[in-house]
Image: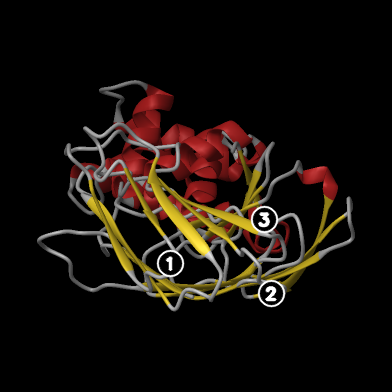
Amino acid sequence: MTLSITPISANLSNLPTVSISSSATSAQTSINFFISNAGSNIVGVQVGVTNIPTGSTFSMASNVPSVWMTPAATTTAQSISAIAIDGTVGANPLPAVYTSPIETLTINQGNITAPLSLSNFTLTAQNTPGKFVDLKLLTTGYNINITGSVGFTVPASSVAGNYTGGTGVNTLVFPDVYSKYAITNLGSNNFNVTYSTNGSVDTIQSFSRLQFQDKGLAYDLSGAAGQVAKILGAVYGSSSVSNPTFVGIGLGYLNQGMSYANLISLALNAKLGTGFTNAQEVTLLFQNLAHANPTAQDVSTWTNQISNGTYTQTSLAQFACDNAINTNNINLTGLAQTGLTYSS
């Protein structure tokens, strides 16, 4: 059986692909399709099914009101070998996060004795910052391979699985709390994760975020996670890097497309208040990096650097964020091994 799912848009370009294969071991398998968008312009989904095994039947049903999705339901018999579901969303924009499945595909093997095999499942998403597709396959275990630069969020099965991410910031979501797992960091965002409940081991490659039911771990320390850690160290002090709530807030802004510089500016205003002076900023940065108050000469030197245009308030703070003193204070190298904890 071959399935494909493609968002519908008038301006699709630079399209990455997710390829997923799954072997179902039960007599009946249901797969739910979810769409979630951080922006507002994902407009629909199309599903095609071919090569139905002899003796099987399947149905595709919409799980949202008809005002959002058409058709309301579609069912096939074994004599039909192909069907296309036009899941065009009837309203734009969508809610920020659509958490319920928009479509459910149910396959019944009928009299087939061999396990039903689902293969060549492809997902194509619009490659635009801040817009993404969140795919969740509710099966007993599967292999996932992602190519392309858009970040995806996919669920881990409760049994062993193989997960290979692409170049985007990909998140693997586990079905239990962090304490139930043992993580072996193999480097380069590759992991073996053992589930203590049943001993299953997931093989994970190129996933920069591992999210559990009670918290997440971000390993993209050369990217967004590293930027958040550096901002927290320079603006709020090194101890704030271990605050999952602060980290989660920062990652949330960057995930939505905010720039590093704008997040620095936001953090400065939140810490010092809107309209803070150059001297207040210099004092704050000295206290957090050097763990000491600046001298009068230090304040004069660095405020003059802002006054004469060498730095802006934001670029001076970025200089402090990226400074080796700050990265050493927050142990950025060590965080690449342990992951940066964030609220999930």
Q: Which mark is residue 168?
A: 1
At numbered mark 1, what does the secondary structure look like: helix, strand or loop? loop
Residue identified by numbered label 2: 187
At label 3, the amino acid type is: Gly
The answer to whether mark 2 and mark 1 are in CB contact below 8 A is no
Which of marks 1 and 2 precedes in the sequence?
Answer: 1
Q: Is residue 292 left or right of residue 49?
A: right
Residue 326, horizontal then vertical, whole percent? 56, 52
Residue at 62% x, 36% y: name it.
Answer: 244
Residue identified by numbered label 3: 339
Which of marks 3 and 1 precedes in the sequence?
Answer: 1
Asked if residue 178 is positioned above or below residue 208 in the image, the reply reads: above
Which sits in the foreground, 201 or 236? 201
Residue 51, horizontal then vertical, whole percent? 44, 78
At label 1, the amino acid type is: Gly
Label 3 environment density (alpha carbons within 10 Å; few <14, some 14–19, many ≥20)? many
Residue 178, horizontal then vertical, whole percent? 77, 45
- Residue 162 in which image quadrant: bottom right
At label 2, the amino acid type is: Gly
Asked if residue 98 is positioned above or below residue 195 in the image, the reply reads: above
Asked if residue 53 is positioned above or below residue 129 in the image, the reply reads: below
Residue at 83% x, 44% y: name it.
Answer: 179
Q: Distance of mark 2 from mark 1, alpha carbons?
A: 17 Å
Observer-side mark, 1 or 3, equals: 1
**Which quadrant of the figure contains the C terminus?**
top right
